[in-house]
Amino acid sequence: MIRYKGHMYREASLAEAEAEKLLAVTLPGSAFANHVFAVGGYVRDEVMGLESKDLDLVVDVPGGAEALAQYHKQAFPREVSTPRQLGQYPIWFIAFKDDVELEGRTYRVKGAEIDIAESQKEGFPDPDSRQREVEFGTLEEDMQRRDFTVNQLMKDMTTGEIVDLSGTGIQDIQDGILRTHPDVEPDAVFRDDPLRMMRLVRFMAKYGWEAAPEVVAAVERNAYRIDIVSGERIQGELIKIMTLGKTAQAMRFMQATGLLKYVMPEIDALRGVEQDEHYHAEGDVFEHTMLVLEKAAPTIEAQLTALFHDAGKRATQEFVGDRIKFLGHEEVSGEIAEAILRRLKFGNKTISKVRFLVENHMRAHSAKEWSPKAVRKFIRDVGEHLEDLLHQTEIDALSSHGPGMVPKDNPIPGLRERIKTTQEIPVRTKPILDGRTIMQLLDIPSGAEVGKAIRWLQEWVDDYAAEGFELTPEEAAELLVQEHTHN
């Protein structure tokens, strides 16, 4: 990875641009001249004026993918990896292990990774599976099997010419419109590969593009087909959206088109769940959640915590007179968060952290009433999750409004100051004396007596800190022996 203007890039993204320059030298005069094309995001990004990366090539010659890979391996045997086929389809992979010297010039291609495919046409014979059948096809057929016109552009690697076979790809990029090929029904695009609906959502979030009306209608008709897509693949698209910080935008579109009730029915169900206007005049639980999401940091854990923090409110809603309560909703929200994340195949570490943050997101709302000891206990209890939890509580408060849309009081700036003052005397995350030391000092076996002693010690540590002193282990041992003797 390299850092440039505050962003991290794979070195290969620059190396692949050099690989394109190398191809412009190796292809003319060969059997592959005018038969090799860059496709997909690499060309789209170039048209948009962005750094092009992930160089994918298409060869419109039967057997051309393997032949092109072997051609470059023979030309540069030391610099190019052994070509290998990716799966069962006619797609081959090569990587540049070192820079290439050719005709007195050095091409900085080390690290470049290139997928090379034959132009294909494809079919999906089983409507309940994504398993596809492919055969050699023309460039036009290969282009039409791709999702949106903005991704159907090609670039002739021999001449450098951009080829827009759909006739609308470049204009759609300029207009910010996501549509399918004029000769391909949008329903077929989403029916063949339902994950394309999630890709649509991601492109809308990433580039601020709009979906054409006929595309939106096709999502509405085909939303149910997302059920045949694995949790891992849906997770991959969601992660890309979350790291953009655009989850709220994505969720709103997914809810409006019916896609959300198949991906996360628990979140879709929050639409229409009323809240007490004394605390949430901004709207129902779904609307409040979206407002929180819009403020969440663009990290996976922060976005997921904001998304799930009130997921349990539907199950815990109670009408008490003219008031609405959600007692214990944070615990239920934590359970729902874990269930969704496991369904989407997130890792245990992410699940554990998000559930902890969700289940504890209400604690700091009452921070103004806390004693110094309560502040220390909070710091100790949340440990390494302190900053993440403060962030969630703050954006939750900033997204909550009382009567007349008066913003709710934000307790976090004041709590941050108190935490800073409190930590002048370090807050121990572990007992000042461990269990073995306590058993030796008091000559007691393992059991309830040890737990009682640990609680005594923690009280003394906090009492000393409240007076501006730090209790030492030696002092703690002396106090413990005295207390045990007198009891």
Image: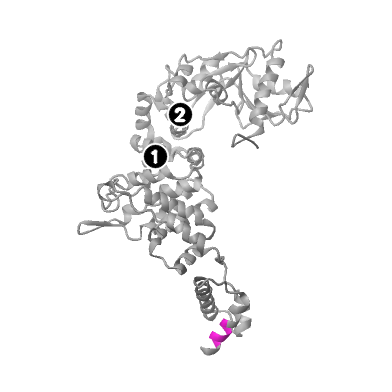
Q: Which of marks 1 and 2 is nearer the N terminus?
A: 2
| Residue 377: percent from left, percent from top | 48, 67
Residue beneath disc 2? 192
Apparent side of residue 468 relative to residue 15 in the rendered image (left or right): left
Q: What residue type is labelled 1?
A: Met
Of 264 and 70, the residue lying toward us? 264
Task: Give the label on residue 251, or none.
Answer: 1
Q: Main secondary structure of the magenta part?
A: helix
Of 257 and 118, the residue lying toward us? 257
| Mark in front: 1 vs 2 | 1
| Residue 336: percent from left, percent from top | 41, 53
- Answer few, some or many: residues within 10 Å of disc 2's Cα (few below 14, many 20 plus, some between 14 and 19): many
- Answer few, some or many: residues within 10 Å of disc 1's Cα (few below 14, many 20 plus, some between 14 and 19): many
* Magenta range: 479-484
Task: Give the label on residue 427, or none.
Answer: none
Instruction: Say whether residue 146 is visible.
Output: yes
Write the residue at 65% across / 19% down.
Answer: 64
Q: Distance between the residues labelled 1 and 2?
A: 23 Å
Instruction: Say whether residue 138 is visible.
Output: no
Q: Which amino acid does label 2 sit on?
A: Asp
Residue 319 drawn above or below residue 465: above
Write the residue at 51% across / 17% down.
Answer: 141
Apparent side of residue 12 relative to residue 297 in the rendered image (left or right): right
What sort of colour scheme is used for the picture?
one colour
| Residue 231: percent from left, percent from top | 48, 43
The stretch drawn in magenta includes residue 318: no
Q: In which quarter of the image is the N terminus?
A: top right
Q: What element carries label 2?
A: helix
Q: What element carries label 1?
A: helix
Write the residue at 65% across / 24% down.
Answer: 17
Asked whether the beta carbons under mark 1 and mark 2 sit within 8 Å of each other, the answer is no
